């Protein structure tokens, strides 16, 4: 817990996003640090062997993890050691020479968007008005999961037919057009957009993760909010 607290403090102070780091990024770092410490339970963190980092990388590869997952694990481990250097506990970075495997699969091939028929099936299954809004925020407006969680009704302008994402990926703000179907869903009773992250997390029938398709398809260049409605 102390090592994670140190890493979190470094991340919010010296990380790429600084104090505006997203909750999702913090969760990924925390998971990566925890798994790394479990893997290095018998390694002296302050004096690791010269090949310990490479051995860790090869172990991740042998487990068949995706290149993106391996990259995330290494990023978390590097963050931990950056925090240790910040605390002047160490001076070295054992991961300097570690190079994660290159992902040869195009992003588009890994994260295909849902088709119109599949989205229609999701909307049919989402009997709760708020669930319908969540599906359409991803499918029509292209919002990521955290952007849906952060969205507030004050940022939705039905008359103007757009909404404002206050803090998107990289902390960027953008204006997104609203489709007629999405506007209609938001006007429905129970379809308001005051969807706090706590409320979304407490919805037992919906779990979310995001994919960003690139290239051609039924919804090109949009982030599709993938919802799995439990049966």
Image (cartoon, rainbow, N blue to C red):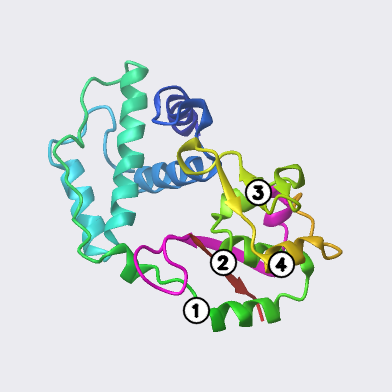
- Tag 2 secondary structure: helix
* Residue nearer the viewer, 198 or 83: 198
Mark 4 neighbour density, 10 Å: few (under 14) some (14–19) many (20 or more): many
Q: Tell me the residue at 13%/38% (across/down).
A: 97
Query: Residue 139's mark?
Result: 2
- Foreground disc of the pair 1, 3: 3
Spatial CA distance of label 1 from label 4 is 18 Å
Q: Which mark is residue 163?
A: 3
Mark in the foreground, 4 or 3? 3
Mark closest to the chain's N terminus, 1 or 4: 1
Residue sitting at x 63%, y 77%: 122
Residue receiving disc 4: 131
| Residue interval drawn in magenta | 195-222
First of labels 2, 4 by sequence position: 4
- Residue 211, compared with residue 3, is above or below; it is below
Asked if the stretch drawn in magenta spans residue 217, the answer is yes
Q: CA distance from mark 1 to mark 3?
A: 24 Å
Q: Earlier in the sequence, mark 2 or mark 1?
A: 1
Residue at the spot of label 1: 115
Q: Earlier in the sequence, mark 1 or mark 3?
A: 1
Foreground label between 2 and 3: 3
Of marks 4 and 3, which one's residue comes earlier in the chain? 4
Mark 3: give few (<14), some (14-19) or many (20+) Cα within 10 Å: many
When asked about the image quadrant of residue 135, the answer is: bottom right
Most foreground residue, 51 or 66: 66
How far apart in space, not on screen, are marks 2 and 3 (Cα)? Answer: 15 Å
Q: Residue 46: image x %, image y %?
A: 27, 27
């Amino acid at each position: 817990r102390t090592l994670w607290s140190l890493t979190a403090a470094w991340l919010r102070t010296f990380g790429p996003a600084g104090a505006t780091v997203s909750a999702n990024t913090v969760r990924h770092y925390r998971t990566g640090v925890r798994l790394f410490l479990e893997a290095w339970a018998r390694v002296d963190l302050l004096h690791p062997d010269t090949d310990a980092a490479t051995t860790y990388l090869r172990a991740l590869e042998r487990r068949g993890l995706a290149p993106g997952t391996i990259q995330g694990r290494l990023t978390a481990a590097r963050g931990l050691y950056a925090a240790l250097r910040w605390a002047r506990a160490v001076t070295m970075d054992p991961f300097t020479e570690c190079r994660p495997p290159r992902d040869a699969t195009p992003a588009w091939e890994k994260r295909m968007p849902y088709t119109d028929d599949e989205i229609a099936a999701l909307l049919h299954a989402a009997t709760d008005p708020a669930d319908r809004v969540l599906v359409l925020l991803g499918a029509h407006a292209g919002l990521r999961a955290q952007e849906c969680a952060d969205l507030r009704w004050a940022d939705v302008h039905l008359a103007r037919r757009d909404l404002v994402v206050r803090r998107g990926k990289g902390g960027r703000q953008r204006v997104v057009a609203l489709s007629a179907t999405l506007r209609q869903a938001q006007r429905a009773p129970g379809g308001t957009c005051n969807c706090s992250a706590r409320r979304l997390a407490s919805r037992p029938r919906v779990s979310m993760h995001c994919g960003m398709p690139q290239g051609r398809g039924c919804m090109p260049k949009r982030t599709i909010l993938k919802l799995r409605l439990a049966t």
